[in-house]
């Protein structure tokens, strides 16, 4: 468990703390890029559980490959979702299936991978998450020295990795440790839940109650399909930054302040809220452009 004890005398100390944390994370991402580039493989599988920071990691890797003179294309595995039918459920509790391998069009993904390895033009579906339908396809001609990044939580599923056979390198990002900040303790999964509550309300129009509802099936899938397979990834990175919960405090307080008292998730929501209330707030203005937290709070 990571233990952090810190108080701030003024706003400049908060800014300095943010910059130190960001510099440390940037160094971690630099190491990931160096290892990926030196491997010489043309296919990267980037995975991690929900709200782990996959988008920021992918953008950093793309930037570093471009700096090295490489051509890079990212393909989201989520775009291979099958079109949703109203009667598709994830389990006996009738939660909608967002995460299992069953929601993916594996034959289409296999066809795409085959064309990539052959250097042919590929047709990648574009999935519209509002309508839960495919909105079209985009064509892309594979270059001889091109790097393809497949990004998504499903990238470590055996049903997915088996389609690639060999010739790929896996990268896994997660919050790696439970954390105690000034004596207040959070599990690593609670940290990701806080990120998701804020993100879903801000960008997906989801109430925090709905996020709690989905979280149960999300966590079930992680324990069944993601974490048992993460060791196929030779490169693993921790996305937690020590200023995070100081930053997320005001957003979480705002989102959970009107939580329905009759909800079955009310006690869980209030427990999270109580944990962050004692923290000194760090303002979003102090966060640099391109930070990991733009995934959850918006671009600057």
Image (cartoon, rainbow, N blue to C red):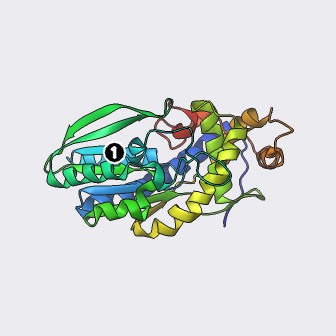
Picture coordinates of residue 190, whole percent (x, y)? 68, 53
Report the residue marked by disc 1: 75
**Residue sitting nearer the eye, 80 or 52:** 80
Picture coordinates of residue 151, whole percent (x, y)? 39, 50
Do we see residue 262 in this rendering?
yes
Residue at 49% from the left image edge and 53% from the top image edge: 25
Mark 1 element type: strand
How many C-alpha atoms fall within 10 Å of the one at disc 1: few (<14), some, or many (≥20)? some
**Residue sitting nearer the eye, 203 or 110:** 110
Picture coordinates of residue 120, whole percent (x, y)? 15, 46
Q: Quadrant of the N terminus?
A: bottom right
- Is 73 placed above or below 186 here? above
Residue at 27% from the left image edge and 34% from the top image edge: 138
Q: How many dots with numbers?
A: 1
- Is 285 placed above or below 26 here? above
Residue at 82% from the left image edge and 35% from the top image edge: 260
Q: From the viewer's perspective, is 15 left or right of 127?
A: right
Q: From the viewer's perspective, is 7 left or right of 2?
A: right
């Amino acid at each position: 468990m990571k233990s952090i004890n810190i108080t701030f005398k003024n706003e400049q100390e908060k800014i300095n703390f943010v910059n130190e944390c960001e510099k440390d994370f940037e160094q971690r991402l630099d190491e990931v890029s160096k290892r990926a580039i030196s491997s010489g493989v043309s296919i990267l599988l980037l995975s991690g559980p929900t709200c782990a920071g996959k988008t920021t990691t992918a953008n950093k890797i793309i930037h570093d490959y471009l700096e090295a003179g490489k051509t890079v294309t990212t393909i989201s595995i989520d775009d291979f979702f099958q079109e949703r039918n109203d009667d598709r459920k994830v389990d006996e509790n009738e939660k909608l299936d967002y995460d299992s391998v069953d929601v993916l069009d594996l034959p289409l993904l296999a066809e795409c991978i085959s064309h990539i390895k052959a250097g042919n033009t590929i047709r990648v579906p574009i999935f519209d998450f509002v309508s839960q339908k495919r909105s079209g396809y985009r064509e892309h001609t594979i270059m001889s020295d091109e790097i393809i990044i497949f990004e998504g939580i499903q990238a470590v599923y055996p049903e997915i990795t088996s389609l690639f056979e060999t010739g790929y390198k896996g990268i896994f990002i997660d919050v790696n440790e439970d954390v105690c900040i000034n004596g207040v303790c959070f599990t690593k999964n609670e940290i990701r839940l806080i990120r998701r509550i804020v993100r879903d309300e801000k960008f997906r129009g989801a109430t925090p109650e709905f996020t709690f509802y989905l979280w149960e099936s999300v966590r079930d899938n992680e324990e069944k399909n993601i974490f048992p397979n993460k060791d196929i990834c030779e490169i693993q990175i921790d996305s937690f930054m020590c200023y995070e919960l100081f930053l997320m405090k005001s957003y979480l307080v705002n989102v959970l302040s009107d939580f329905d008292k009759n909800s079955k998730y009310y006690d869980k929501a209030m427990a999270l809220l109580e944990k962050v209330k004692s923290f000194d707030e760090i303002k979003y203005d102090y966060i640099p452009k391109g930070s990991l937290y733009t995934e959850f709070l918006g671009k600057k």
